[in-house]
Amino acid sequence: MIDGKTALRVAFGVALCSLSLGCDEADGGEDSARLELEEALTQTRATDCFSNGEGLFIQNQLNSVAGEPDFVFGLYVDDQCSAPFVQIRTRVSRELGAAIEGIDGAYELDVTRESLHATPFTEDAAGALEAAGCGTTTVGSSMDVSETGCFGFEAIGECGFDFDIAAVVDGVVFGGERNDDMCEPQGRPSQLGTLGFSA
């Protein structure tokens, strides 16, 4: 139904890094850019609503429930992203690390993926999840897909980490340019991506 790998590259990035950062202190104390990023990542944020090119629309969100951060990849049936089709929710923990040389205000962002859940919001969506090998559930019911993965989001056992970068640019949070190797430290991006999260 969707190109899961493409959706993952476009969507995942900074979203996994969302909230309640466990951060190392920068040399000489935290500078203003680091503090701005820390603050931005404790806020509820979302991308614009955009087409997946196959008749559905995507909006990604950073959320926090009782201080526990997660990232929500959302597929919607309308171009306002008001009518959900499927949501894939990733619970994470993360650590903000060293400044990135050559990119003003950017820092390493090491993310641990803790769990993965999928929720269909229509009968067609439930059928799509089952057809994709995610498992079987009913409309509106969340199912744990941590062991199987779902819609391009890899199983936790196959990819338990995401080595990213992040920065705030004009009040918008950006993660790194996505690639297929970010489960390993050597896959950390060297430049920012173009998908931003606004408050």
Image (cartoon, helix red, strand yellow):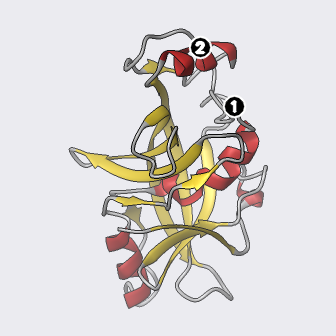
Label 2 neighbourhood size at 10 Å, few (<14), some (14-19), many (20+)?
some
Label 1 neighbourhood size at 10 Å, few (<14), some (14-19), many (20+)?
few
Question: Is 177 placed above or below 56 here?
Answer: below
- Where is residue 132 drawn, in percent x and y? 69, 19
Mark on residue 127? Answer: 2
Residue at the (50%, 15%) spot, across then down: 123
Three-letter amino acid code at disc 1? Glu
Residue at the disc numbered 1:
158
In the displayed image of the protein, which residue is found farthest to the left? 66
- On screen, residue 17 versus residue 103, left or right, reads left
Disc nearer the start of the sequence (2/1): 2
- Where is residue 139 drawn, in percent x and y? 41, 16
Mark 2 vs mark 1: in front: 2
Figure quadrant of residue 106: bottom right
- Where is residue 167 drawn, in percent x and y? 52, 76
Residue at the (63%, 51%) spot, across then down: 51
* Relative depth, front residue between 35 and 24: 35
Quarter of the picture holding the C terminus: bottom left
Q: Work out whether residue 183 can be spotted.
A: no
Three-letter amino acid code at disc 2? Gly
Q: Work out whether residue 37 can be spotted.
A: yes
Question: Is 6 placed above or below 122 here?
Answer: below
State the SS at label 2: helix
Figure quadrant of residue 22: bottom left
Alpha-carbon distance for marks 2 and 1? 25 Å
Question: Is 106 placed above or below 137 here?
Answer: below
